Image: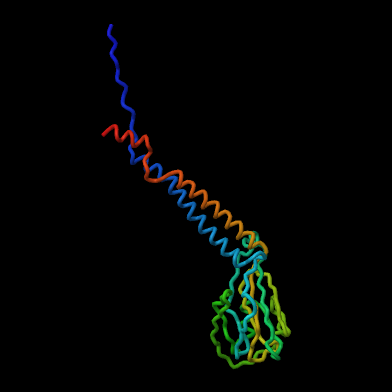
Amino acid sequence: MTTATQTPPPPVQVPIEHRRKSRTVPVTIGAALATIGAVAALAGGGVLAAAGDDGTIGSGGTHTVSTPTAALVTDTAEFSDLNEVESLVGDPEVGVTATATGDGPDKFVGIGRAADVDRYLAGVEVDRVSDVEIDPFEYDKRRRSGNETATSPTAQSFWVASSSGHRADIDWKVRDGSYKLVVMNADGSRGVSADSHFEAGAPYLSTLALTTMLIGLMLVGGGLVLVARNPAYAPSASATSASRSTS
């Protein structure tokens, strides 16, 4: 009885192109992780460098601000959904100091709701301040004409934060709403000149920035490991051997 010898079927060869494509998946993921991590690390490091250990970004010393009008008034600042921010970094705060220069009159610093400030200074010539840069400190201002005389800001009751004296100094916990900051002479007279300092921050800002930077660095490291272990275009040794044997 003769038994027929059956030749086993040849092994299925996976095309080299398919293997290369399968290898690009972890490489793509690794590159994406490294990119995202780099962005996060740079952002966190930048905030940490600016805010320091106390989470405060300041104008770096005092700077003279002045106007021949009755007041320097910022454009409206809009704040909303601060509860979400507070859960991450704590209560955001703004600090402003204005010190009289030389023998000048006492100064006033106040923050009020935009509508209240507009009513108080309606018809009064002021300089409106916009585009404030903290480091280096710069600000742009534009004149709003008017013929009315400003009454003393210290006589107003609408301020949410205010201070007056030779050195006026406020620290305000930011709240939802529309607000304006005002720097004036305490008696409301024209010609305001003061050495001022501005700062803003939050208690846990530095901690969040440090955490973001460290997570970013970890993502960069993990992404680079994936790329290094999975070269995108180098075929495996077995695939190269199989290719040669079939040629």
Q: Is residue 116 above or below residue 218?
A: below
Is residue 185 or residue 214 the one in the foreground?
A: 214
Is residue 197 or residue 155 the one in the foreground?
A: 197
Residue 45 screen position, x and y as percent: 57, 62
Q: Quadrant of residue 172?
A: bottom right
The reply to whether residue 123 is visible in this rendering is no
Q: Residue at x 28, y 6 (%)?
A: 1
| Residue at far left of view | 247
Residue 38 screen position, x and y as percent: 51, 57
Q: Residue at x 62, y 67 (%)?
A: 51
| Residue at far bottom of view | 147
Q: Quadrant of residue 201?
A: bottom right
Q: Is residue 118 above or below residue 45?
A: below
Question: How many circles with numbers are drawn on the protein?
Answer: 0
Residue 27 screen position, x and y as percent: 43, 47
Task: Give the color scheme: rainbow, by chain, secondary structure or one colour.
Answer: rainbow
Q: Is residue 124 left or right of residue 107?
A: left
Q: Quadrant of the C terminus?
A: top left
Q: Is residue 48 left or right of residue 238?
A: right
Q: Quadrant of residue 240?
A: top left
Q: Is residue 181 above or below residue 19?
A: below
Q: Is residue 150 above or below residue 30?
A: below
Residue 76 screen position, x and y as percent: 58, 76
The reply to whether residue 23 is visible in this rendering is yes
